Each structure stands twice: as structure tokens, then as C-alpha cells.
Amino acid sequence: MPHLVGTTAVITGGSEGLGYAIADAFATEGADLVLIARDQDGLDRARRTLSCHGTTVRTLCLDLADHGAATTAAQQVLELTDRVDTLVNNAGTAHFSPLAQTSADTFDTMLHLNVRVPFLLAQALLPALTTGRGSIVNISSYWADSTGTDRPSAAYSATRGAINAMTRALAGELGPSGVRVNAIAPGAVRAPAYEREHIVPMSAEQSEEHERHTGDAYPLGRVGAPREVAAAAAFLASPQAGWTTGTAQALSGGSYRARDAWHRAPS
């Protein structure tokens, strides 16, 4: 029997890639959905395909990078549904550059979308989450533990470290009210963003070499698939994870060395 029947999940960045895979996993388990993304066409496609699971799919077209959008999103969510059982903070952004070349605006953009928006959404939706004794799932990254020796990532790593710290702190704060808070820290996942950054710019020969180097960095011999991260998110939201809170679950194919493969591959 599906484990999320009768629940409603709010998923940011749910129109494509990892967010869409998470939405699909939740819908497969019977959850109704509210998807938030900035691409109306993508949201329409997601609604059509995800509705095939027999669940209700509602969408909100908002760019959460805009200041004030998180508050607006929360207000509109509560106008669409009278219950929120799970909040999945998936929307985020990444920029990699050396410290000397990272502007304050770039840092602020990542801090806003990767940390401030999840905080504001959790805050605004907390009464509904408390009523349903629900859960929050934050999508982080293994870059939170970067030493900075393989790729300059101080600003991005700081935001991912912050979301992990916030996850643990909120788990302690909200636990007595029955709300669980967990994070997932994926390694490289073959989603559209990964394809655009690492595969599309390469020739076929370079792509093959890149895949070989990347595979060598993982004990399991490959990058992750969106459905594998999505399955973990659905589990953390389910009653099966009823005693799980405050975790930052690493999904990295067994190795944090995988970051190195992104940079040993030919460019």
C-alpha cells in the first residue's frame, strides 16, 4: 500500500529534474502535490504527467529568487490547500568561483535561495505542518563538506553547510510538536542541470572520458539518478521514517572524492 495517501506535499523547483523526480516519487506513494517553480510550461507538463498517478496536482508559478516570493508562495499554498504534510525545499542555485572572484551579489543570491527561502517557507507553513505532524525535507549537497581543494566553492559550500545546520537545529526545536526535519546531501546526479554543465559542452569523446573519470571516483561506478534521491525524500516523508529527524543523509555513491572527477575530466 502506498505510504503517503491522504497527505499533501509542497515541492519547490518541482517542474523538472530532481524536483520533478521527487514529485513523481511522492505522487507514486499517493500524495497530493503543490509544485512551485518559475517555468509555467514546465509546471503544466508536470501537472499533466503527474496527475496520471491519480493524485491532485496544483501548481504555482513563482521565481523564489525574487525577494518577497517565498512569503507570497506560502500564502498562495494555504489558499490552495488546507493541509501541508511535507515541505520539500529543493529549489536552489550554485555558482563556483574563487573567493577573490565571487561578488557580494552572487553570494547574496545563493544565500537567499539556498537558505533564506527554505527558512521563510518553513516558518510560514509551520502551523499547517504542526497540525499534520508533518515533515520538512531540505535538499542540500555534498559540497557542504568541501575542503575547497578540488573546486573553489566557499560561497556555495557555506550555504549548503548552513542548510544542514538549520536542519539539525529545527529538528531539535520542532520535534516536540511532532514535526520532523531532515536533509539529503546528494553527490553528482544526472539531472538536467548536470547535463547542461558537464555533458552538453563536450564532444562525444570528451563525454565518454568524463563519464569514465566520474565513474572511477565512485565505488558504485556511476553518478546518481534523480529517482534515487527522490526515493530517499519520499521515505523521509513517510511514516516509515517516523523516528528519523535531524539527519543530513549523504547520497554520494559511497565517495566524497567524486567531486574531483568533475575537474579531472577533459574540458
Image (cartoon, rainbow, N blue to C red):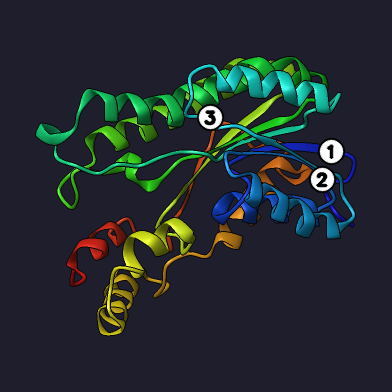
Real-space Cα separation, disc 2 to disc 3, in angstroms = 23 Å
Name the kind of residue labelled 2 in the image.
Ala
* Residue beneath disc 3: 64
Task: Note whether 206 is above or below 126 in the view shown.
Answer: below
In the picture, which quadrant includes the C terminus? bottom left
Q: Which mark is residue 65?
A: none
On the image, the x and y values in percent for residue 70 come to 58, 22
Real-space Cα separation, disc 2 to disc 1, in angstroms = 5 Å
For mark 2, give the secondary structure: loop
* Of the image marks 1 and 3, the number of the one nearer the N terminus: 1
* Residue beneath disc 2: 31
* Of the image marks 2 and 3, the number of the one nearer the N terminus: 2
Name the kind of residue labelled 1 in the image.
Thr
Real-space Cα separation, disc 1 to disc 3, in angstroms = 24 Å
In the picture, which quadrant includes the N terminus? bottom right
- The residue at the point 75 percent across, 14 percent down is 127
- How dense is the environment of label 1, judged by Cα within 10 Å: few (below 14), some, or many (20 and up)? many
Task: Note whether 24 is above or below 82 in the view shown.
Answer: below
Q: Evaluate if marks 2 and 1 touch, with contact meaning CB atoms under 8 Å apart.
A: yes
- The residue at the point 82 percent across, 19 percent down is 131
Quarter-wise, where is residue 59 in the image?
top right
For mark 1, give the secondary structure: loop
Furthest residue in direction front, as rendered: 41
Q: Nearer the viewer, residue 78 or 188?
A: 78
- How dense is the environment of label 2, judged by Cα within 10 Å: few (below 14), some, or many (20 and up)? many
* Residue beneath disc 1: 7
Q: How many marks?
A: 3
Res. 178 in view = no
Q: Is residue 187 left or right of residue 100?
A: right
On the image, the x and y values in percent for residue 107 come to 28, 28
